[in-house]
Amino acid sequence: MEGKNDLLNSVMIAFIAQMDAAMEIAKLVSEHGGEEELSADSLIAGLVYRLMIPMNDEEMNFLYNSCDVYINLASNEGFGLGSLEALTVGTPIVVNVTGGLQDQCGFKKDGKYLTAEDYVELKSNHRGEYKEHGEWVKPVFPSNISLCGSPKTPYIFDDRCQYEDAGEALYEWYKVGPEERERCGEVGRQFVLDDGRMTGKHMSESFIENIETTFKKWKPREKYTLEVV
């Protein structure tokens, strides 16, 4: 029983920590204006509903289409399904520049979108080497970057951004107005369908291609023995 209680406590601490950050963001955004829809209470009510109430596909589609902006501040997101789904219906996004979320930003090098080959050399754009990005996103660059990993996963960057920066990004979207948000969201939707290659069909093709390449070029990694020191 004690082990279960410890697990529950850990989950609750993590949840409360996320809600605390969400409340700070909501407070910062609401302070920029006196509009009722921007009150901290209304923003938090929406966040709690989204976190606590399960939804089916139809309800999720309605929610994404009802949002003005979708925000994802994960610190080491491998892909970012939620923000991609939002872009797919034309909802602009705010994301932390980490992991797979970078692909949704449409960062550019010499006027062209960064490719998978570019990222092989770059590793990550979390330090902001490339700042030009798609119109559909307000990227938030992390203020704290750490490296972690395990024997099975050699390394993972954990990138933490400041909630003040996230709040400012949300406010930037608010200031441009609904028509501009809609226009930018549609540009993002076209990116997902075309250059971004993020549809189910595109990703299936990429998965098959990468698996075939792996079989052709696979070289076993050198074996190591873990010793207690």
Image: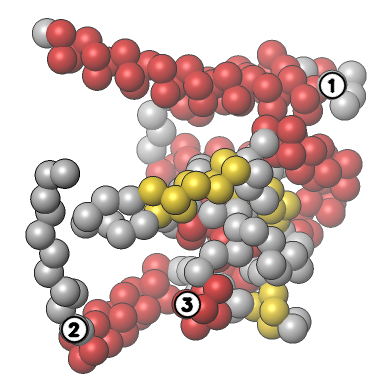
Q: Position of residue 166 (x, y in %)?
A: 70, 39
Which residue lies most toward the front here?
Answer: 229
Q: Residue at x 24, y 82 (%)?
A: 214
Q: Which mark is residue 31?
A: 1
Q: Residue at x 44, y 51 (%)?
A: 147
First in residue order: circle 1 vs circle 2: 1
Q: Residue at x 55, y 48 (%)?
A: 145
On the picture, is 159 further left or further right than 229? right
Q: CA distance from mark 1 to mark 2?
A: 56 Å
- Circle 2 Cα neighbour tier, 10 Å, few/some/many (<14 / 14–19 / ≥20): few
Residue to which mark 2 is pinned: 219
Task: Kindly identify the amino acid type of the residue bearing the numbered disc 2.
Answer: Lys
Q: How many marks?
A: 3
The answer to whether marks 1 and 2 mark residues whose Cβ atoms lie closer than 8 Å is no
Colour setting: secondary structure
Residue to which mark 3 is pinned: 120
Q: Position of residue 57 (x, y in %)?
A: 41, 44
123 over 172 or under it: above or below: below
Q: Residue at x 16, y 74 (%)?
A: 222
On the picture, is 156 further left or further right than 95? left
66 over 123 or under it: above or below: above
User: In this rendering, which labeled residue sits more in front, label 1 or label 3?
Assistant: 3
The secondary element bearing badge 1 is classed as loop
Q: Nearer the viewer, residue 218 or 105?
A: 218
The answer to whether marks 1 and 3 mark residues whose Cβ atoms lie closer than 8 Å is no
